[in-house]
């Protein structure tokens, strides 16, 4: 037997040759590229309303309503006067500015349309006529709870108050129902105007701006009118240029601004000062000289010339003041204990804004309804 001796280098070469003879590794399978995802087209924005009826349809569930303009104006004849709805602005049609004093009847927190409250509203109407009132404001809580019959209150106002009457929500009324109710009265009672949507009433040199609802959500009933600091800022943006032009501005709000102490418009029994700080700051900052409020019923029948400290004005007023803010209380016949421990069964107020051409001054008188 012959033995073949191989050297180490030969083995290495053989191993290398064997390695080179191995098949190449398979190529990775290329995955198909995913198809690009087509983005869904952006939804078309809702068309802006062109008529008052379309604006009601679009914003009737929203409170406070936005500030807006309409390309098509609507003319309304009511209580011997002609108005134009230009969007969220209602303008009195007349030659020149407002002449003489403006007398405003105020009904706060009507709450119900029961027999005794109907008698209260009739008495208020007689007093308004006697004092030569031009317009009436009902600034919120037209019903006393979510189940209240708003249609009965609207009928009571429409049949009793024959003056232009500006109504807006408090913290009880269901917003959509409020809109539907007063939209439904336009033909029979054209003098009733919804200030949830008509945020600015231009009387010619004198302007009412509304702030319906309330700013503390826990005290706003479901689907009722709630506002926050953004709505206060939006209101300020509308008011500021009017004030800077030297025009007279009256803010009509359901809730009062924050005050100090037990004599304030916002002092609530067992709760203290509960008014809105953002509203108070705005009224000071612009500044707005006149304000009509209610909501804190036990503090009704009060007036002040200082929106921050709210030092009370002695009543009855003997002379007008440069600044006036008041709490109108409640017109309801339902007994309500006031902060002085007396019981009110309904009150109303008349505000007189005079010297409009020079920035205005004001005075107020309160009277009992029962």
Image: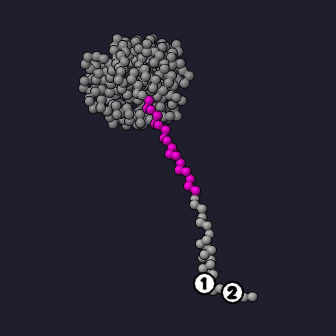
Which residue of the protein is positioned furthest toward the front in this rendering?
1
- What secondary structure characterizes most of the magenta part? loop
Q: CA distance from mark 2 to mark 1?
A: 15 Å
| Mark 1 element type | helix
Does residue 99 belong to the magenta stretch? no
Using a 10 Å C-alpha cutoff, classify the residue at mark 2 as few (fewer than 14 neighbours), some (14 to 19) or many (20 or more). few
Query: Looking at the image, is 261 positioned above or below residue 196?
Result: below
Res 111 seen here: no
Q: Position of residue 312 (x, y in %)?
A: 38, 30
Q: Which residues are magenta?
A: 29-46
Using a 10 Å C-alpha cutoff, classify the residue at mark 1 as few (fewer than 14 neighbours), some (14 to 19) or many (20 or more). few
| Rendered residue at 71%/88% (across/down) | 3
The N terminus, quarter of image: bottom right
Res 159 seen here: yes
| Rendered residue at 35%/21% (across/down) | 72
Residue hosting label 1:
9
Q: Which mark is residue 4?
A: 2
| Rendered residue at 41%/14% (across/down) | 190
Query: Looking at the image, is 204 positioned above or below residue 2?
Result: above
């Amino acid at each position: 037997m012959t033995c073949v001796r191989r050297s180490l280098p030969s083995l290495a070469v053989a191993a290398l040759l064997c390695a080179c003879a191995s098949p190449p590794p398979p190529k990775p399978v290329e995955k198909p590229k995913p198809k690009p995802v087509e983005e869904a087209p952006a939804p078309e924005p809702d068309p802006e309303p062109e008529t008052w009826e379309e604006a009601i349809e679009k914003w009737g569930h929203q409170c406070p309503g936005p500030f807006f303009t309409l390309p098509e104006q609507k003319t309304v004849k009511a209580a011997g006067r002609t108005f134009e709805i230009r969007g969220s602005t209602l303008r009195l049609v007349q030659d020149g500015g407002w002449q003489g004093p403006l007398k405003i009847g105020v009904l706060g927190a009507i709450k119900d349309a029961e027999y005794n409250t109907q008698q209260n509203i009739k008495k208020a109407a007689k007093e308004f006529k006697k004092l030569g009132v031009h317009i009436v404001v009902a600034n919120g809580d037209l019903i006393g709870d979510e189940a209240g019959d708003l249609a009965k209150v609207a009928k009571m106002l429409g049949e009793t108050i024959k003056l232009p009457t500006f109504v807006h929500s408090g913290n009880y009324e269901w917003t959509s129902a409020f809109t539907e109710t007063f939209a439904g009265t336009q033909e029979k009672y054209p003098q009733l105007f919804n200030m949830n949507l008509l945020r600015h009433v231009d009387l010619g040199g004198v302007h009412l701006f509304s702030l319906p609802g309330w700013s503390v959500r826990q005290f706003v009933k479901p689907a009722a009118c709630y506002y926050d600091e953004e709505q206060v800022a939006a209101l300020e943006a509308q008011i500021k240029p009017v004030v800077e032009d030297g025009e007279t501005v009256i803010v009509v709000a359901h809730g009062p601004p924050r005050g100090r102490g037990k004599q304030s418009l916002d002092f609530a029994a067992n709760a203290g000062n509960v008014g809105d700080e953002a509203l108070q700051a705005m009224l000071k900052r612009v500044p707005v000289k006149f304000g009509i409020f209610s909501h804190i019923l036990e503090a009704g029948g009060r007036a002040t010339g200082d929106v921050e400290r709210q030092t009370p004005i002695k009543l009855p007023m003997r002379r007008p003041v440069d600044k006036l803010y008041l709490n109108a209380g409640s017109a309801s016949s339902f007994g309500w204990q006031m902060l002085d421990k007396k019981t009110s069964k309904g009150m109303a107020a008349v505000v007189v804004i005079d010297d409009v051409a020079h920035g205005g001054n004001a005075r107020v008188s309160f009277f009992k309804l029962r």
